[in-house]
Amino acid sequence: MGDYVILTTLLGKKVFRLAKVEETGDVYFKKERINLKTLIGAQYNSIHRLDRSTRTLKHAGLTQEQLREILDVSFTFTELNVDDESKDNRLINDDGLAQKLDRDDIESLKNQGMSGDVIIKTLVENSNTFKERNVFSQEKYLKKKQAKYSNLIRVLKPNPTLLTEMYYSQGPMKINNLRIDSLAQMLTACNVRSGAKFMVVDTNMGLLTAAIIDRLAGHSSMFTSSASRDYGECIQIYLDDAPVSSWRQSVDALNLSPAVIDRCLSAINIKKLYKWEFDNDTKPKDELDTEIETKEDITPIEPKEVDESSNVDEPEYKKQRLDEKTKRKATRIKEENRAIDALKNKDMDGLLIVTRNHDPTNILTFLIRFLGIAQPFAVFSLSIDPLISCYQSLKGIAINSRITETWFRNYQVLDSRTRPEMNMSGSGGYLLTGIKVDFQ
Amino acid sequence: MEKGNTVNVNSKKAVISAGDHLFIFISPKQMYPLKVVPKETFQTKFGPIKHNDLIGVKYGTKLNLSKGWVYVLPFTPELWTLNLPHRTQILYSTDISMITCQLNLKPGSVVIESGTGSGSLSHAIIRTIAPDGFLHTFDFHLARANEARKEFDDHGLTSLVRVENRDVCQDGFGLKAIADALFLDLPHPWTAIPFAYEAMKPFGSRICCFSPCIEQVQKTVQALQSMCFMDIGTMELVSRPFETKQMKMEKFCFTETPESESNTTNDVKAVPSIQIAGHTGFLTFATKI
Ligand SMILES: C[S@@+](CC[C@H](N)C(=O)[O-])C[C@H]1O[C@@H](n2cnc3c(N)ncnc32)[C@H](O)[C@@H]1O
């Protein structure tokens, strides 16, 4: 209840839709209006049938046989032509002076029967189904099939990878072309792990933030036993005066309990952090903290409400809005203090930057001061040029700095028709990674 | 200071102590793994390092040696991958990153892996699933399994991983419906698919098979299809590094008259490396529902 799910099609082109499971209120998926309340209590990754009369989803309860039929699986595993190459190297030592097996040894090995491997005759050759149709009728067949089963819908559990795939499929620029492989490289380059503290500049629906939070909290939010463990921290550093409305969309989609989020996620405006760093160098720290709490004038402005124009102006409603505003402000201040608390020791464990409209160079050179010595950073950019200027700015600050990109392509794997897919993404952006060190 | 667990606790460790695993960094292409053992000495081309001199030093410090300087870096799975003792072919960080993402690894995940090989991927998995996940890793080569076990132990990871000497293609994993994710880097991954299916949790657990050759992929995909795995997808990744170079370029002069000095530019440019690793393997992912 109140959880997010990702709806997707079972057959045909993949379409994704992130939706919240609620008692009332419908969602649109492939032009169909659906109420999701029947999903309450349902298993993630189950298949549901859309009942078009009630506009609700019912668990499809497919048997393995039905699933086979729908997925066009015309063979079982034992019908596969799994060839039996029985030579392997398990008995050969790696120590260089490997003992040479004499011919008898090898014979006896063979006889002892690596025969355990499944040896069978081929599949598709003698199946009279799919393969024998010509290309044209295959297509027609597939279309018919897809139409027939278009009411079958999969209900997926949102995770950062799936969310990336979903947003990417809606248009790569929606997430600044932060392709999944680039996001993946950033997370490993920064050794993102539970218990550590990360700074993130993220302008992509909170995708990078969500990916970090996922690796801090993990499955643990489901178990009370780990309630006491230290997840680590993710500090979202935003560049706009106030965070854009979508800044945590992906984080919300992870369905973590607010208590968990509360313990590992905070945020601060970068200008405020800058001010804190440079205005107060000489003052003692605790005096500072209180000052920040009370200084109203530098509190970020609230994000603009979209529905500002709407008609309602009952005092009740207004009061509620005001309450909400104060509450939000209080949360923001709490988060800011937490962020400062974590940042002030200047021993953060990683720094990850994805900007959209800003040159990352001075953002990097400012934030890197909060990074601990010997800790990694990663900067993503749509084009390579800003990374060159970042690279130059790091002289005397970092080692092992590298600019890379990943070349990434998907394959169609079909019997005798295996090849790269016709379309591929020309670029997934560029990355600068490195390690901060102590020169002098 | 913190005890054990090299992979995860470094974040809290600013200072080197005896027993630490770390890296001596000379250049991106020259790093050495080192375990700090009091009284021992480590030789580098810039002169010897006395282990005792490392103790108490901050990570990231520039260490002056008799003939030059080096940096001391804390243990990370990525640096380990670049510098570990090779007992087999290993997986590198580009593929490992994608595997970690696509298998949805996170703290608490239960993962099955075979073969263990040199433990390159294992270290990265353990880092991500710690502190409450678990890795079951299998290799049918006895010496490799033993070596890996010793290494995990040495790295303080025993509570997060179990190494078993077993042929998973013939005997399976001996585990039922417990894995959130399963990974195969074997010559014949397809023969292990039914066992994999059995060992994986229902409703959304993920599998990955890594194979260098397309024929292997073909068989693996058929085996996955035959077991009704969903979201079957095969992909390939290549990391393209760039070299940053100061590049002098002269502007061509059409007339004889020499012009002002602004005729040459001297900018830093990023030039794609000319010789790179072109192929590691194909990654095939799928979901058990
Ligand atoms: C290429 S290595 C794996 C490397 C590993 N992924 C890494 O990153 O270090 C393949 C390993 O699989 C093991 N192996 C091959 N067939 C096996 C089988 N049927 N059961 C268990 N292990 C097997 C081999 O002994 C070898 O150590």
Image (cartoon, coloured by chain):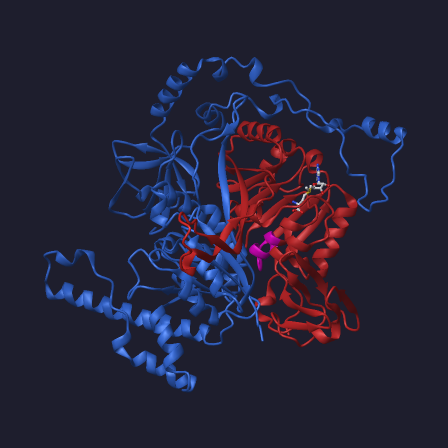
**Magenta stretch?**
B124-133
Task: Name the spot of residue B180 as percent of width and height, x first.
Answer: 54, 46
Task: Name the spot of residue B200 as percent of width and height, x first.
Answer: 57, 41
Q: Give the blue chain's letter.
A: A
Up the image or down, B188 lies above or below A140; here it is below
Q: Give the red chain's letter.
A: B
Asked if residue B126 is among those painted magenta in the image, a careful observer would answer: yes
Asked if residue B92 is among those painted magenta in the image, a careful observer would answer: no
Q: Quadrant of ligand 1?
A: top right
Q: Which picture quadrant has residue B88?
A: top right
Q: Which picture quadrant has residue A236?
A: bottom left
Left or right for B219, reference A67: right
The front one of A326 and B47 is B47
Main secondary structure found in the magenta portion: helix
| Residue A352 appears in the figure | no
Q: Residue at x 70, y 60 (%)?
A: B32
